[in-house]
Image: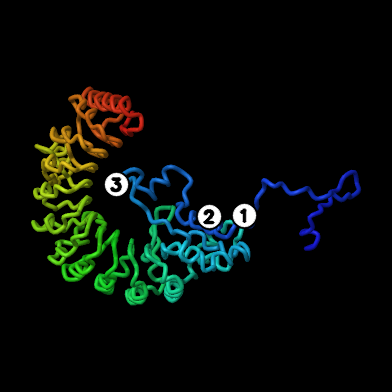
Amino acid sequence: MTQRRRSSARRLSYGGEARAVAPRAPDERTLHINDLPDALLIEIFRQLAQLPPVTTDEEQALYARGVLPFRTFEYPGEVHPGLRAYPFLAQVCRHWRGVLESREALPALWQDLVVDFAHELITGVHVPVRWSDVRPSDEEFREAFAAVRLQSHRVVDFVRERHQVLRRLTLTNSEGYWADDGEFVAVASKHTFNLGTLGILLGMLSQLQELSIVHCNDLFSSGSPLSTIAMLRGLRSLTLEDLQCRIYREPLAELGRLTQLTALAVNSTQRHGVFVFGIDCIPDTWKQLGNLRSLELRGNALLESLPDWLPGALPHLESLDVSACSRLDLRSITAWTQLTTLSLQAMDLVWGAAPPRLLTQAQQHGIVARVKQLPDLSPLRRLAALNLADNNLAEVPPWLLKMSGLEVLDLSGNFFLECQQPLNQLQTFKRLRWLDMRAVHVEADTSYWSPPKCTTMQNIAAVAKLLRRRNRHVRVMYDTS
């Protein structure tokens, strides 16, 4: 049977008797993937590592920020597992295994590595491959997932084999992940990777340039890894994302030793309004981070002020994101005249008096309306991207309509924002390519639009038409129903 299956001659049954069919001459235009040069096959694998596993535009938005230079809730920048998203490539055939294990593939495929603990555990359900072409039932998957474990030495050994070429490392989801049904699945007890293992791992990676630790709060439960991270003196980019623990001044000060950093993100995630996570100060040692060009401090609701010396200590800083830092005093923000990108999303900002509807709603719920004044940002003359989404603005600040150098402006989610006057000044923004005004002037009764809301939407639609007439590539987003 094996020889017959491999034979190039096929036997077909016709009219009750079998006849031999001569093999067709190969089409010179047809090329099998195994006929490709190894270098081209490696390039295909490299591209696979960069393509997120998505099928719709909505899913694509989760993995990319689109054209935006800052994060938003719509474009959060989810972590893609990279080549580890395809763990069974080496099992396809011996040729592929040989290519993947070749010396040429090492620098081409493994300068970036994403260790997604949740993904590795789910993949472990299929090792050995039990369901090659049949999707397991929910009961089969739950039974297999309950038994699967990930030993830390496997991660360490995998990194050790690639440490000479590895330059960018991401560790994610060591504490758990959100399943498709919306339930959180804890995995911290299903692997043995801990703070000590992280130290061993980073000790092998003296040439590492970028490090991201995302949704790994279990690694912080027994202490802070920041002193270990600070040993990577060649690090250019450091991201600590989705923190749900306190980061105190002493360990935070250790990051001042990373003098080569150009990008730093220490982002917290608040839950149910309990402000106990993240950082509450900027240590003096950060004066040594003079090479920083991007600083993200999202969600640190305990942070009340930025030091007066910070703008002068970071002369090259171009991008600042302090979104959801609800207690942060913004009066000194105008000193950052070198900024080209500023994100002030979800900070309860108002311009002038608080919106009456906001005060009424707060009174009805028996709470105090939290508002904070948005300062005049017109001194920031180099600003090209501004994110003011999800605040409490009741009108477009007049100085904002004079910042004609803006390329990206996000005002979405300002539920109380009304535009009772035309926005024709925006047509003078020659560089504007993205304007988001969705979810503005939101009213309780959605069955019809009140006259004031009709005026708001007419003015937004009118300026959108003007902008598109001038440049058909400009993207203006607003609600139409």
Q: Given the image, on which type of amino acid does mark 3 rest?
A: Pro
In the foreground, 90 or 442: 90
Disc 1 on helix, strand or loop? helix
Can the viewer see residue 394 in this picture? no
Which residue is rendered at x = 50% and y = 63% of the image? Answer: 123
Which of discs 2 and 3 lies nearer the camera? The answer is 2
User: Which tag, 2 or 3, sits closer to the chain's start?
Assistant: 2
Total numbered badges shown on the rendered structure: 3
Query: In the rendered structure, which amino acid carries the disc numbered 1?
Result: Ile
Q: Quadrant of residue 378?
A: top left
> Residue 124: which numbered mark, if any?
none
Q: CA distance from mark 2 to mark 1?
A: 10 Å
In this figure, which residue is indicated by the disc labeled 3? 69
Q: Nearer the viewer, mark 1 or mark 3?
A: 1
Q: Position of residue 152 (x, y in %)?
A: 42, 74
> Which amino acid type is shown beneath numbered disc 2?
Ile
Instruction: Residue under label 2, please give it.
Output: 44
**Front residue of this view, candidates 307 and 245:** 307
Residue plotted at (46% across, 71% down): 149
Q: Position of residue 407 (x, y in %)?
A: 26, 38
Whole-Å distance between the Cαs marked 2 and 3? 28 Å
Quarter of the picture containing the C terminus is: top left
Q: Which residue is mark 1?
A: 33
Q: According to the image, what is the colour scheme of the structure?
A: rainbow
26 on left or right of 62: right
Q: Residue sitting at 23 percent across and 67 percent down?
A: 258
**Do callouts 2 and 1 mark residues in contact (Cβ within 8 Å)?**
yes
Label 2 or label 1, whichever comes before in sequence order? 1
